[in-house]
């Protein structure tokens, strides 16, 4: 969700990486699903990297997702050359009501050709309707080449691989102003206890509120709150408990989850600590997440908790650098140097087996596309073919390295991996109720009772 820098991307290295999967330039594909195409027409000048996708003059592929505004513009930019070289018109439609409307469209017999699905749980639900098409061979090959088994598993339902990942984000970043922190002598915390201490010190200073927070996101309102809880469950209870919780091998309202959520509440339900730039605690429930971190740039709050993609949502002209307007540190663990992070991503699934649809789906799973999109700015990919140097800031480059580091304990966003009725339903709603005044045990009991039997 799930975000100004424009960098021209030479196709040399990325193009070679993609072509290694599909054969030599000019070879006719033995299987259209392995290297989508269907035309022997020669490639246009400068389009050699796209030859094996084929040419489909006048073809249209519609793509539906949650990505909006400037991020939608960047998405369209990422496949512009692909469109020119293949003749496929990729028509993207973004919606703030995607999670509800994709089900309506599928049930009504009017699904898109492709969907950018932000939750593995929702992907599983859609695949369960029988309406999705298994990934073509080209996508399978790219996934096996460029994505870890964990990422492949998130796109697999009942043993069938449907969708390769698209973009990725490292969650749990805390965004702050380096100059403001330096002026006030605030030190970057290395543990959660130290984070509590600096939060209290900022509040006591009276300079500004420590935190600005926003859960608003149209039909998806509440999801930023689930990120807080997931980050704290992973850090305080550990990855094994996190996995058990997501898989419902322990109750949703297990005491360890209660403890983690209460620790979040100690920060974001404390009127002394929030909501800088917006008002009191009650404003969290409705404040749009896309602008919730802007008070950091206006010296109205000291910290904002949000994923790496938020770099692309700060006001135009904001410099993200260690000595710039904004920088970030990863939410620490209970001990210093803990290497556990949560993250998210999207998955491109198909509802049509047309060759032009397979061509687009395969391109979006390639290292070539990942490098193009990351170079445009504001996002990341966990694609192993990504050159971190293509990231639009040093912070995103470091986050890309974190994703690729085998020593990192990475866990996918918990609510996204849960069954849709919970992860994008009762859990989201519970966070709104909770920040609006309900107690922790009550909302967690409600989510537990909603888990599908």
Image (spheres, rainbow, N blue to C red):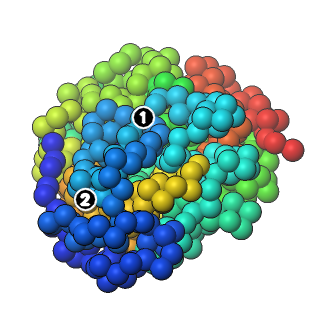
Q: Earlier in the sequence, mark 1 or mark 2?
A: 2
- Please tell me whether mark 2 sits on a helix, a strand or a loop: helix
Q: Decide which of 413, 268 is in the foreground and name it.
A: 413
Label 1 sits on residue = 94
Mark 1 neighbour density, 10 Å: few (under 14) some (14–19) many (20 or more): some
Can you see residue 186?
Answer: no
> In x, y percent, where is residue 347?
51, 54
Q: Which quadrant of the figure contains the N terminus? A: top left
Between tags 1 and 2, which lies in front?
A: 2
Farthest right residue? 453
Q: Residue at x 68, y 47 (%)?
A: 131
- Splitting the image into 4 quarters, where does residue 373 fall? bottom left
Farthest front residue? 40
Q: Decide which of 444, 26 is in the foreground and name it.
A: 26
> In x, y percent, where is residue 119?
57, 48
Can you see residue 345?
Answer: yes
Q: Decide which of 79, 95 is in the foreground and name it.
A: 79
Label 2 sits on residue = 85
Mark 2 neighbour density, 10 Å: few (under 14) some (14–19) many (20 or more): many
Q: Residue at x 50, y 17 (%)?
A: 282
Side of 20 where 319 appears, left or right: left
> In x, y percent, where is residue 387?
27, 71
- 329 w.r.t. 271: above or below: below
- Please tell me whether mark 1 sits on a helix, a strand or a loop: strand
- 65 w.r.t. 121: above or below: above
Q: How many marks?
A: 2
- 119 w.r.t. 39: above or below: above
Q: Which quadrant of the figure contains the C terminus? A: top right
Q: Decide which of 239, 318 is in the foreground and name it.
A: 318
Side of 404 where 446 appears, left or right: right
> In x, y percent, where is residue 208?
28, 27
Q: CA distance from mark 1 to mark 2?
A: 24 Å
């Amino acid at each position: 969700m799930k975000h100004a820098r424009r960098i021209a991307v030479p196709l040399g290295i990325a193009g070679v990486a993609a072509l290694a999967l599909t054969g030599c330039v000019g070879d006719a594909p033995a299987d259209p699903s392995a290297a989508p195409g269907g035309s022997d027409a020669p490639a246009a000048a400068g389009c050699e990297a796209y030859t094996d996708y084929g040419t489909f003059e006048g073809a249209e592929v519609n793509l539906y997702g949650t990505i909006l505004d400037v991020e939608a513009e960047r998405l369209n930019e990422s496949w512009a050359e692909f469109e020119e070289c293949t003749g496929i018109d990729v028509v993207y439609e973004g919606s703030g009501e995607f999670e509800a409307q994709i089900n309506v469209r599928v049930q009504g017999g009017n699904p898109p050709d492709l969907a950018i699905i932000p939750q593995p749980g929702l992907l599983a639900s859609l695949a369960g309707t029988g309406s999705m098409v298994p990934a073509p061979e080209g996508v399978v090959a790219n996934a096996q080449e460029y994505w870890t088994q964990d990422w492949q598993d998130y796109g697999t339902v009942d043993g069938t691989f449907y969708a390769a990942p698209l973009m990725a984000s490292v969650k749990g970043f805390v965004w702050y102003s380096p100059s403001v922190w330096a002026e006030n002598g605030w030190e970057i915390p290395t543990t959660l206890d130290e984070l509590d201490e600096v939060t209290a010190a900022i509040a006591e200073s009276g300079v500004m509120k420590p935190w600005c927070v926003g859960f608003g996101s149209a039909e998806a309102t509440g999801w930023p709150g689930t990120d807080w809880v997931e980050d704290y469950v992973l850090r305080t209870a550990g990855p094994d408990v996190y996995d058990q919780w997501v898989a419902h091998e322990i109750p949703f309202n297990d005491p360890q989850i209660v403890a983690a959520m209460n620790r979040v509440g100690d920060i974001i339900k404390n009127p002394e600590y929030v909501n800088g730039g917006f008002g009191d605690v009650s404003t969290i429930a409705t404040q749009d997440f896309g602008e919730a971190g802007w008070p950091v740039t206006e010296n109205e709050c000291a910290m904002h908790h949000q994923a790496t993609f938020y770099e692309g949502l700060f006001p135009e002209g904001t410099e993200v650098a260690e000595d710039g307007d904004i920088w970030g540190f990863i939410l620490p663990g209970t001990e210093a140097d803990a290497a556990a992070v949560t993250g998210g991503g999207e998955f491109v699934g198909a509802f049509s087996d047309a060759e032009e649809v397979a061509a687009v789906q395969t391109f979006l799973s390639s290292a070539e596309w990942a490098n193009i999109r990351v170079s445009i700015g504001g996002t990341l990919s966990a694609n192993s073919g990504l050159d971190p140097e293509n990231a639009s800031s040093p912070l995103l480059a470091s986050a890309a390295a974190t994703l690729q580091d085998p020593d990192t304990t990475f866990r996918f966003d918990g609510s996204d991996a849960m069954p849709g009725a919970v992860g994008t339903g009762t859990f989201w709603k519970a966070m709104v109720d909770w920040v609006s005044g309900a107690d922790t045990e009550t909302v967690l009991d409600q989510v537990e009772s909603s888990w599908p039997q």
